[in-house]
Image (cartoon, grey):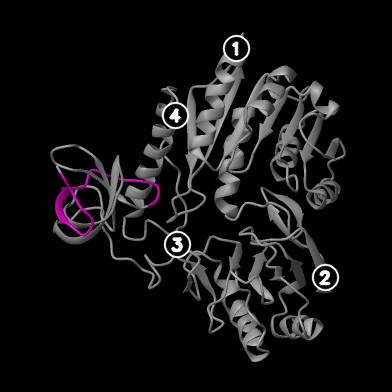
Amino acid sequence: MTVKKNQTVNLAVTDVNNKGFGVARLDGDGRVVFVANAVTGEEISAKIIKVASDYLVARCEEVFTKSPYRTDPDCVAFPTCGGCVYRHISYEHELFLKTEYVRHAFRKVKLDLAVAPCEGGEVCGYRNKVECPLTSDYEVGFFSARSHKVVPATGCRLENPALTPILKTVTAWLKEHKVSLYDEESGKGILRHVYLRIGEVSGEVMVALVVNDDLPHAKDFADFIMKQHPNVVSVLLNHNREKTNVILGKDCTVLSGKDHIEDSLCGLKFRLAPLSFYQVNGKMAERLYKKALSLANLTKDDTLADLFCGVGTIGLFMAKEAGVKSLVGVEIIPEAIENAKVNAALNGIENATFICGDANSKELARADVIVVDPPRKGCGEELLKRIADISPKRLVYISCNPDTLARDCAILKPLGYETDIVYPFDLFPRTGHVESVVCLRKKA
């Protein structure tokens, strides 16, 4: 079947992918068509907007048969904003789709593992951190999907509602003082992003402006924000002068208050610096970490290693709960390691060592159990071989990317590690992301 751009075709939608596109196939040649704003089970007409050799992209024009999973979006920025992809789909079906996404990732690498149903949580107000560019009118926004056009999104449905009035105060000050906005093409302008983080339990808030140059009246800005909002305990500048789409730079300057905020997770206290990794959904992170603890099956004679440890949340929680012999945490960000050391002291954990470095550290050689929580790119073959050389009894792998998790599990299988069940957790409701945890056991 020959199909051209702008042609309208009738389609039966059989699935929805992790980008929020309905999935259908062309009559005749069976090519896959990805359809924006289409839902599983719908009969539709769609306009072709892109033709590639092995797939097409289309836009839903008319729905002949409506899916039982379709819902009315509860956000005016959807679907233009690139944050949420499932606002037009029931949450129950979203959890099913995420379970299938994880299952499919493992099937692609020929690992037929059992996948538990994805555990869900609150769909609104769960994010304890926001990183926002601004529109030309100084309104908080987010980038549109597959572009850097800023879509206005004040009061995002995902962010902790306590952050909304602070964001409004910040943007009003920036507008009043005519702070220039960064232009990606020219590399000129001062303000790149507004970055806020809140302690979900403590209520403490950090406000940071990501800047390309010096901010005029910076101290006045800090004093004004802290006076207007007493729960703001830290105001900083984050310096990013690189021509990059990476949001945060490596250096921060404290304008007023502390260089950190504090929060509680899994009954422990944690100090959080601006560059330190911390799960954005605290309630679901607690459920995920408790599952990881049960999979680790730690004993009091075990040495636990926590790779990509950040501020120490996972390792310190496991060490405290299981009463392990010792804990070794490894992280490449110096600021996070300093936080982790303080966090161990805050929680009275004296048998923890934190190292700024990588998995080649000699302290890891005695690890009985290892837990990893890498970035989206996963661990990779070199690190996995290093872990296999250490030969822990169990490797508990937490991942925010099913595809790299499945790839790494496939790499570990011939290295002597196998698993049986994958447990997905929805730390990012309404978005296309899903967290998973799996325990890989050394074969006898």
In percent of the image, x 68 and y 89: which residue is there?
Answer: 177
Picture coordinates of residue 330, whole percent (x, y):
78, 38
Mark 3 is on which residue type? Gly
State whether residue 48 is above or below residue 362.
below
State the residue position of label 3.
Answer: 82
Do tag 2 and tag 4 residues touch (Cβ < 8 Å)? Answer: no
Picture quadrant of residue 15: top left
Q: Earlier in the sequence, mark 3 or mark 4?
A: 3
Residue matched to label 1: 443
* Whole-number angstrom distance, CA of label 1 to CA of label 3: 43 Å
CA separation, marks 3 and 2? 31 Å
Q: Residue at x 44, y 50 (%)?
A: 432
**Is residue 443 shown above or below 92?**
above
**Label 2, on which residue?**
254
Locate the C terminus and report the quarter of the image it occupies. Answer: top right
Q: Left or right: 8 with respect to 277?
A: left
